[in-house]
Image (cartoon, rainbow, N blue to C red):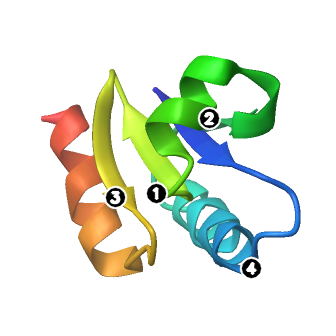
Amino acid sequence: MTVHFYTKTNCPLCDKALLILEELQEEIDFTIEERDIYTNDEWLEAYGVMIPVVQVNGEDLQYGIIDQNDLRKRLLTFFK
């Protein structure tokens, strides 16, 4: 499974969210594809005020302040 992680540089919330994702990788098998919103106009328009955004299969699972426990539950639903 690939987790799309919409982010930008100099974003403390994004840094925290990435650490959460990396910790969850120890429990759940997925890869992280980081997407800098400033490299794509569509991403910038869609996620400019929401980042960080965690997305799987086109579904935004969480954005802004990422909660590790809630995100774990959401990610595990893709394995059922």
Three-letter residue code for mark 3: Gln
Task: State which tag comes first along the sequence, 2 or 3.
Answer: 2
Residue annotated with mark 1: 50
10 Å neighbourhood of mark 3: few (<14), some, or many (≥20)?
some
Residue annotated with mark 3: 62
Residue annotated with mark 2: 44
| Left or right, residue 35 beside residue 25 | right
Secondary structure of the residue carrying tag 3 is: strand
Depth-wise, is mark 1 or mark 3 nearer the camera? 1
| Quadrant housing residue 57 | top left
Calculate the distance from the C-alpha at mark 2 to the C-alpha at mark 3.
Answer: 17 Å
Task: State which tag comes first along the sequence, 1 or 3.
Answer: 1
Depth-wise, is mark 1 or mark 4 nearer the camera? 1
10 Å neighbourhood of mark 1: few (<14), some, or many (≥20)?
some
Up/down of 41 relative to 47, above or below: above
- Residue drawn at the location 78% of the way across and 35% of the way down: 38
Asked whether residue 57 appears in the rendered view, the answer is: yes
Residue 12 shows which numbered tag?
4
Calculate the distance from the C-alpha at mark 2 to the C-alpha at mark 4.
Answer: 18 Å
Return the residue nearer the eye: 8 or 73. 8
Calculate the distance from the C-alpha at mark 1 to the C-alpha at mark 4.
Answer: 13 Å
